[in-house]
Image (cartoon, grey):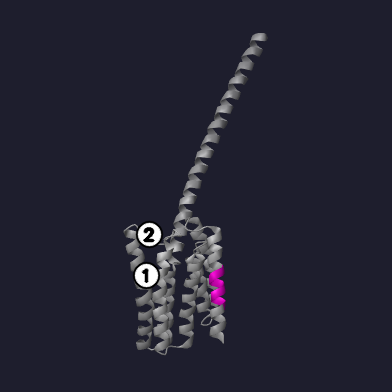
Amino acid sequence: MKNSFGRQSKKNTCRRKQETRLHLLFLHLYRLSWHRFSAKLEEMKQKVAKYISIIGHPLITIPLFVIITTFSQSDLKKALFISFLIIGCIFVPVVLQLYRKSKNGTYTNFDVSDRKQRKSMYLFILPLLLVVTAVLYLSGQPANLCLSVFCALMLIFISQLVNFFVKSSLHVSMNIYLSFLIMPINTTIGIVVFLLTGLIAWSRIVLGRHTFKEVWVGAILGLVIGLIMFALVKN
C-alpha cells in the first residue's frame, strides 16, 4: 500500500510539474505573441500617423484650397495671377528653403521640429507673406482675399512670438485657419476640415513632432485668428 501510494504521489508530482511547465510555456507564448502584436500595432499606428501628417501638411492643404477656389470662382487670368502670387511666391520658396535647409543639416527635418531652428523659418516666411499681401491689395484684388492673406500673416507673426516660449503646431493652426477660410464658401466642408484637424493633431503627437501642449497652443492660435478673419469677411 505504501509503495502504491508513493508511486501515485510521484505521478501526481510529475503531472503537476508538467502542468506547470505547460502553463509557463503558454504564458511565454502569450507574452511573445502580445509583444509582437503590440509592435505591429505601434508600427501600423506610426504609418497611419505619418500618412495623415503628410496629407494634412499646410504646404499641401492650403495650396490645394487656393487652386480650387481661385479657378472655380475667378476667370482664368485672375486665377493664374492669384495662384502665382500665393503659391509661386510663398509656398514654392518655402518648400525649396525647407528642403535645402533640411538637406544641409541646418534644420533637423523638413517640419523644422526644433523650436530654436524655427526662428529663421518664420523670418523667411513673414516677408514673403507681407509682400504678397501688399501686392494683392495694391492690385485691387477682392477685399476678402486680402483680409484672408493678411490674417494668415498675423497668424505666422503671432506664432513667431509664441515660439520664444513654446513651439506651436503649424499643422494644427494653419488647418484650423483653413477651415474658417472654407466655411463662408461651404459650411459643411469647413466643419469637416475643422474636425479632421483633430486627426492631424493626433498624428503630430504620435510622430513625436509635438507635445500635447504644443498642439493645443496651435489649435488656440488657429481658432482665434480664424474667428477674427471669419468675422471680418462676414462684415
Instruction: Write the residue at 48% across / 47% down.
Output: 39
Quadrant where the C terminus sits is bottom right
Q: Which of the labelled discs sits on residue 112, or is there none?
A: none
Relative to 149, does residue 16 appear above or below in the rendering?
A: above
Q: Residues within 10 Å of mark 1 (few under 14, many from 20)?
A: some
Seen from the viewer's position, the closer of residues 76 and 2 is: 76
**In terms of secondary structure, where does tag 1 sit?**
helix
Amino acid bearing label 1: Val
Which stretch appears magenta?
220-227
Instruction: Write the residue at 49% across / 75% down.
Output: 154
Q: Is residue 74 visible?
A: no
Q: Which of the labelled discs sits on residue 94, or is there none?
A: 1
Image x and y of residue 204, in percent: 49, 60
Which residue is identified by label 2?
A: 107
Seen from the viewer's position, the closer of residues 203 and 124 is: 124
Image x and y of residue 18, in percent: 56, 25
Image x and y of residue 17, in percent: 58, 23
Q: Earlier in the sequence, mark 2 or mark 1?
A: 1
Examine the structure image and report whether residue 234 is included in the region drawn in magenta: no
Instruction: Write the residue at 32% across / 59% down.
Output: 103
**Total number of numbered discs in the rendering:** 2
Relative to 166, does residue 75 appear above or below in the rendering?
A: below
Q: Residues within 10 Å of mark 2 (few under 14, many from 20)?
A: many
Quadrant where the N terminus sits is top right
Instruction: Write the residue at 50% across / 73% down.
Output: 155
Image x and y of residue 25, in percent: 53, 32
**In terms of secondary structure, where does tag 2 sit?**
loop
Whether residue 120 sits left or right of residue 235 in the image: it is left
